[in-house]
Image (cartoon, rainbow, N blue to C red):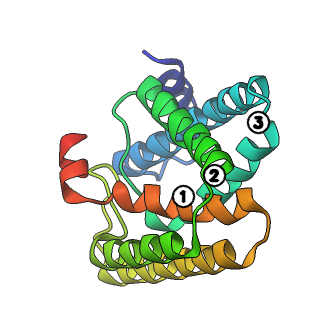
Amino acid sequence: MRLSEKFSMNLSNYIKKTLPNKTEEDLEIIRYGIEVFFMNITKLPIILAVGYILGLFWYTLYTLIIFGILRRFVGGIHARKSITCLISTGFIILGAVYISLEYPLTIIAKLFIFIVVLYVFFKYAPADTEEKPYLDKSVRQNLKIKSILTASVYFFLSISIMNPFFSNIFSTYIMDRSHSYMPDYIQNTK
């Protein structure tokens, strides 16, 4: 049993003793949430440490914050294993930092990215998973609107901020998020 599973199992058993009216389904949801939280708490310091070693700590931290805001609304696919999640998230974060620092985007490129992202988010957002499906139509619609609004804010920030890194990171990330919504990409990760 993985450490995150053991931790979530122990905590949910404590919750079961403390709140005996919780159903098994409630406890399963709680266990899943605890496990995801635990995995994220352990993943972030590792990614920040790699960013620090590469001399990119602050860029990595800013990127994690920017990514976290949009990811909250758009959802997305999940890796089956923690190590896969860590490696892929590390590559996405550090890759976005590198691209944003080394390859400035023109306003035309940013506009093109934004149009593609709007189309993809309008058509596919939010991306749910088998473990966390969005069954309620109003919840889906609310998350879709928040996704599109956040992407729009990111686009306007990307064309109005003078700092090249911040100007690029907003466009780079919404491009990455929209790519992970494409049906072929989602199908190939299952």
Reading the chain from its start, which is encountered first: label 2 or label 3? Answer: 3
Contact (Cβ within 8 Å) of mark 2 with mark 1: yes
Q: Which residue is mark 3?
A: 56
Number of residues whose C-alpha sits closer than 10 Å to that of mark 1, classed few (under 14), some (14–19) or many (20 or more): many
Disc 2 or 1, which lies upstream in sequence? 2
Among numbered discs 1 and 3, the one appearing first in the sequence: 3
Left or right? Give the position of 56 relative to 63. Answer: right
> Residue 176's x, y, as percent?
45, 55
Q: Which of the 4 quarters of the picture holds residue 135?
A: bottom left
Dividing the picture into quadrants, the one containing residue 161 is bottom right
Query: Is residue 181 at least partly visible in the picture?
Result: yes
Eyeballing the image, is 14 above or below 170? above
Which residue lies under the disc numbered 2? Answer: 100
Residue type, label 3: Leu
Give the residue number, with chain letter if any, for mark 1.
Answer: 172
Above-or-below relation of 15 to 6? below
